Amino acid sequence: MKKIITLIITLMMTGIFFLTMSVPAAFAGSKQRHRWEGVAIGVGAAILGSAIFNSDRWDTPRERVVVIDRDCHKPRHYDRHRPKDHWEERKIWVEPVCERVWNPGHYNRHHQWVPGRHIIIEKRPGYWDKKRVWAGCR
C-alpha cells in the first residue's frame, strides 16, 4: 500500500513539474511589472537560507545545567544521615589591578602634537575565582 501511494505522489509531482515547464515564457507578463515581488521573495529566501545554513543547533554540544538544591526541609527518610549544613563553592569576580601612570606628550601618527596626560594601565586582568562558603540552613 505504501509503495502505491508513493508511486502516485511521485507521478503527480512529475506531471505538475512537466506541466509548469511546458508553458511558454510569453505568458509570464512584463519583466518590469513584478520586479519588487521578486526582490522580496529573493530577500526572504536569502534570510531563510542563511538562518538554516548558520544554525548551530546540532553542531555545538549543549551546556550542562547543574541544579543545586538549597532546600533543607526535605522529608525525614531522605536526609536521615545527611547533615543539613554544608560547604558550597561560589564564583566571585576578582577585580583587575590597574595603575594610573603619566603618558608624556608625543606626536601621533597624523603628525599632530598630543599633550601629556594621566592614563590607566591594566596590570593584571580580572578573573573569576571559586570560594568555599559555609551554607547553613535558616
Image (tube, rainbow, N blue to C red):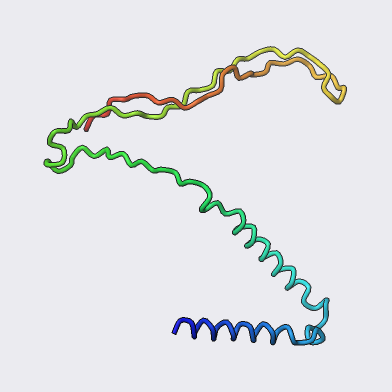
Q: Residue 28, position in %: x, y? A: 78, 83
Seen in the image, is 6 located left or right of residue 30? left
Vertical relation: 129 (above or below) 75 = above
Q: Quadrant of residue 130?
A: top left
Seen in the image, is 23 located left or right of residue 47? right
- The one of 71 and 60 positioned closer to us in this rendering: 60
Q: Quadrant of residue 119?
A: top right
Q: Residue at x 47, y 23 (%)?
A: 94
Q: Residue 118, position in %: x, y? A: 68, 16
Q: Residue at x 72, y 16 (%)?
A: 117
Seen in the image, is 138 located left or right of residue 2? left
For this orientation, the residue located farthest to the right is 111
Q: Residue at x 28, y 27 (%)?
A: 87
Q: Residue 23, position in %: x, y? A: 75, 87
Could you tell me which quadrant the N terminus lies in?
Answer: bottom left
Tally the marks: 0
Could you tell me which quadrant the C terminus lies in?
Answer: top left
Vertical relation: 16 (above or below) 136 = below
- The one of 116 and 66 positioned closer to us in this rendering: 66
Q: Residue at x 49, y 85 (%)?
A: 4
Q: Quadrant of residue 82?
A: top left
